[in-house]
Amino acid sequence: MRGDQSWWRGYRSSHRLPDACLISFGLTGSLIVILTVLAILSLAVPEFGDLPHLVQVATQERVVDSIILTMGAGLNAVLILLLFGIPLAYVLARVNFRGKGIVESLVDLPLMLPHTIAGIMVYLLFMERGVLGAPLASAGIFFEDAYAGIVAAMVFVSSPYLINSVREGFENVPLHIENVARTLGASRFQAFTRVVLPLSVRHIYSGAILAWGRAIGEFAAIIMIAYYPMVISTVIYYTFTTHGIRESRSVAFVFLIVCLAVFGLLRFLTRFMGKYDDRI
Amino acid sequence: MIEFDGVSLRLGEFCLQEVSLHIGRGEYFFIIGPSGAGKTVLLEAIAGLHSPDEGRILLRHDDVRNTPPEERRISLMYQDYSLFPHMTVEENIAFGLKMQQVPPEKAQGRVRGIMERFGITSLAHRLPRTMSGGEQQRVALARALVVEPDVLLLDEPLAALDPLTRDFFILELARICEEYGLTVVHVSHSREEALRLATRVAVIIDGRLVTEGTREEIFSAPPFREVARFVGMENIIDGAVESVADGYVMIRSGDCLLRAPDRGFKEGDQVAACVRAHEIRLSPNPPPAGWEENVLAGRILSMLSDGAMVRMTLKTPFFPVIADVHRSKVIRHGLAEGMEVFLWCPPDAVVAASLMHGDESAS
């Protein structure tokens, strides 16, 4: 009898019994992953079956230029967001003021709006007769069917992703650490740059990746103000309506590969970023 | 050195109310009070991290309303030490000097000097997360002192240490503060720390500075009932002054009369008779001849040994009593739970404490 018990204990310690709850959660959640994998396969399988056509589309100047334009405009949008979003995120993280809830709702607004509405708002603001568009046009900066229009639309739709992520990073830095820095002689700005910012690098980086991803994926808001020059989403839509599914599928697949490579690399680099973020 | 002149400050739901106090140069000033009383807010207000809504804070006789924290020459150390996790020990200590634009060679000399002084030279290149609580505490203290502040603010600096390390650091703190000639404001829950370090003590409850005085005044003869409770007086018996004579008051609580030294009370005043547990004397036999006051009969309900002392809870006809009795006496008298005993205490061991403003209605 004693022998049987020791066998059972040995079995239990070497074979952990599966957790039924985790298994059911895993199976339920895997449906989402399966859906994405199926979508990728439905795009990729026909393309691998027709490699010469894929190569021909991938090397078209129009497609390459459009990918570079999209990536570059997205990067510019993120840089603008970093410049203006980091101060806003810090204020939201550290200061309680009357009307803060309204500001927070305004920050989150692009998340909730249909993107066509976002596009109309950006267009009305930046068109040549718009509140901001008119003075900027007189200074020689045009947004309608222009690069600046693409960046403006990207900034608008991707701003919540960066601001909220950065804000979370700032909130994770204990106020005590900042207070101590100040009593040691650092001004608020120095405490921010020397202590808060380095301890939030990972959140800033993640927010920037999310915002960039959101920016380069934008379509509806961009075509409202800048159909030309064509970002990749516009090229895919244009190709679909003029050349059909085969052509547009190839363009889409090329951009998918580019995105997977770029964001895969960026995610990989995350592990080297802000290694102190989680240890404060 | 530091003066609070009717300072009121509101932070969300919390409110510091009309605090006035004076802390002299070189004092080791202790602020005690329950959690959420406003001790840390008061400390941060001295550091310039909160501005008063009303009143003034004076540092070296100057109103510092418009002086930012970085210009006050005040160092602050929190319970969690708040070391910069992305900097080595050396960088942490050098941070303040760098911010104050001390020339690098001079700064390096001062950093090395204080690391030697605190015995942390071997930790110079370590990151805070790799160090023990005691090591982090030394680094935080070195970082706070290397900038040569006039005032050192300590927010529960010993709370996260184990008892042995804490004992060691209490002695260290006393020595360092004397050596540097610092004015120290130390906030804590701990009565033990206050008793061992403080020159003066203030008690803050619900955002109000209830009382301040020497540690003897606060701990031996607390002026208010709530303060008596906080400084650990185990027996607090509510009553009213029945008579005043010969420097003593008679306090009536139900049918019981207790005698205590007078503190300027008059007949009818609502007071609390406060007695420390170790002042209660206890025996199965009546007290010696001559003891007539402050004598009760009671029954031992429970006994809890705490090393050399045994804490007893007793039931009397009037109120429960807590008494600390030496183990040898327990053995000598064969004291046991359920036993009927006599208990008494000398009148001078009873503290008559007033009710705080607002407590009258509660009683």
Image: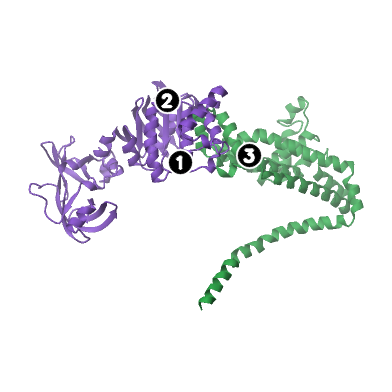
Q: How many marks?
A: 3
Q: Quadrant of the C terminus of chain A?
A: top right
Q: Residue at x 85, y 48 (%)?
A: A251
Q: Residue furthest left?
A: B289
Please state the horizontal and vertical placement of residue B264, each as a whole percent of the image: 18, 34
The label shown at residue B150 is 2
In this rendering, is residue A118 above or below A244?
Answer: above
Q: Colour of chain A?
A: green
Q: Which residue is mark 3?
A: A201
**Label 3: few (<14), some (14–19) or many (≥20) C-alpha neighbours in 10 Å:** many
Q: Residue at x 84, y 58 (%)?
A: A45
Q: Quadrant of residue A84?
A: top right
Q: Secondary structure at mark 3?
A: helix
Q: Secondary structure at mark 1?
A: helix
Q: CA distance from mark 3 to mark 2?
A: 35 Å
Q: Are marks 2 and 1 in contact (CB under 8 Å)?
A: no
Q: Chain of mark 2?
A: B
Q: Is residue A119 left or right of residue B58?
A: right
Give the amino acid type for the residue marked by disc 1 in the picture: Gly
Q: Chain of mark 3?
A: A
- Which sits in the foreground, B303 or B252? B303
Give the amino acid type for the residue marked by disc 2 in the picture: Asp
Residue A16, visible in the rendered structure = no
Q: Which residue is mark 1?
A: B134
Q: Chain of mark 1?
A: B
Please state the horizontal and vertical placement of residue B158, each as a whole percent of the image: 41, 40
Give the amino acid type for the residue marked by disc 3 in the picture: Val
Q: Which chain is purple?
A: B
Please state the horizontal and vertical placement of residue B189, each as a whole percent of the image: 37, 41
Residue A3, visible in the rendered structure = yes
